[in-house]
Image (cartoon, rainbow, N blue to C red):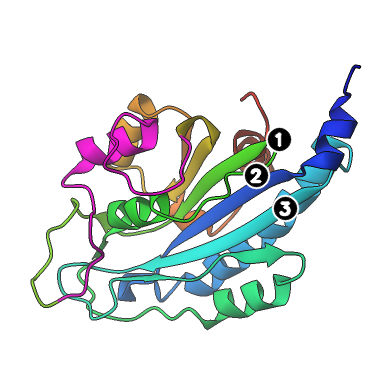
Amino acid sequence: MVISLADLYEKEPAALDFVFCIDASANMAPILDKVKQAVISLSREIVEEWKDWSSDYPAQIRYKVITFRDCRFDAEPLVESPFFSIPDHSQAFSDYIHSIEAKGVDYKSSSALDAIALALKSDWAVSGCFRRHDIIVFSNSVTLPICPRSTKAPYPEHMPKNIEQLSSWWHGFDPTLESTFISHSGRMVAFVPASEPWISMGQDWCWFWTVFFPAATEFKDGDIQCALRLLIHDDF
């Protein structure tokens, strides 16, 4: 008996998980409202892109949010939401995005790499005939190395020691990552300044694309389409 792709999707819908890592440091205050609008817009585009690309095959789509600030000094350097199932909890996801505030110390720096590490530790979906474990980063700050924090700031356990170990987590080489992340299902898009470590990551990391524009405050149609293609499609 031959099982068609339609039959396969009907028996086990696709599972698409997306974690939005949003810089909420004080440095983001002038543009945070635009970033929120960009996140909401992209979240809707993702749903439409899946419908168009998959010919309306069913999918379980979930969104999660991690806000990050400066892990050295801020009282709330990393804050994560649960996963929101879409479309059932679309309003709750939107409300959560709109509730984000730019606050904390203003050293023009933030801990985006730590946020990526925390995202990788998420409870990603493991079912589904087609899976995506995607991370989308928005930042306009200088990116700090992993872990340059004070002992007083709260910090998750079992985090990578440096960017090299973070890269190994992303590529599936390091078994110390304690999560259900599957590297070949992972895609990442970063709307960030044209600076390190993003330049090197764009060159060295697989399935990773950087858009060198301040935190996606102005989407270009070409950037949107390239981001959606990487996040959802099988090719890029």
Point out the frontmost of discs 2 and 1: 1
Disc 1 or 3, which lies upstream in sequence? 3
| Residue at image point 23% right, 68% down | 70
Q: Looking at the rendering, which quadrant does residue 126 occupy?
A: top right
The amino acid type of the residue labelled 2 equals Ile
Q: Which residue is mark 3?
A: 60
Q: Residues within 10 Å of mark 2 (few under 14, many from 20)?
A: some
Q: Position of residue 55 (x, y in %)?
A: 89, 37
| Residue position for label 1 | 129
* Residue linked to disc 2: 224
Q: Residue placed at 39% from the left, 78% from the top?
A: 102
Query: Looking at the image, is mark 3 or mark 2 nearer the viewer?
Result: 3
- In terms of secondary structure, where does tag 2 sit? helix
For the residues labelled 3 and 2, the Cα–Cα distance comes to 22 Å
Q: Are marks 1 and 3 in contact (CB under 8 Å)?
A: no
Q: Secondary structure at mark 3?
A: strand
Chain-order first, disc 2 or disc 1: 1
Going by the image, does 97 lie left or right of 194? right
Magenta region, residue range: 153-182
The image quadrant of residue 92 is bottom right
Compute the Cα span from label 1 to label 3.
11 Å
Packing grade of label 1 (10 A; few <14, some 14-19, many >=20) is: some
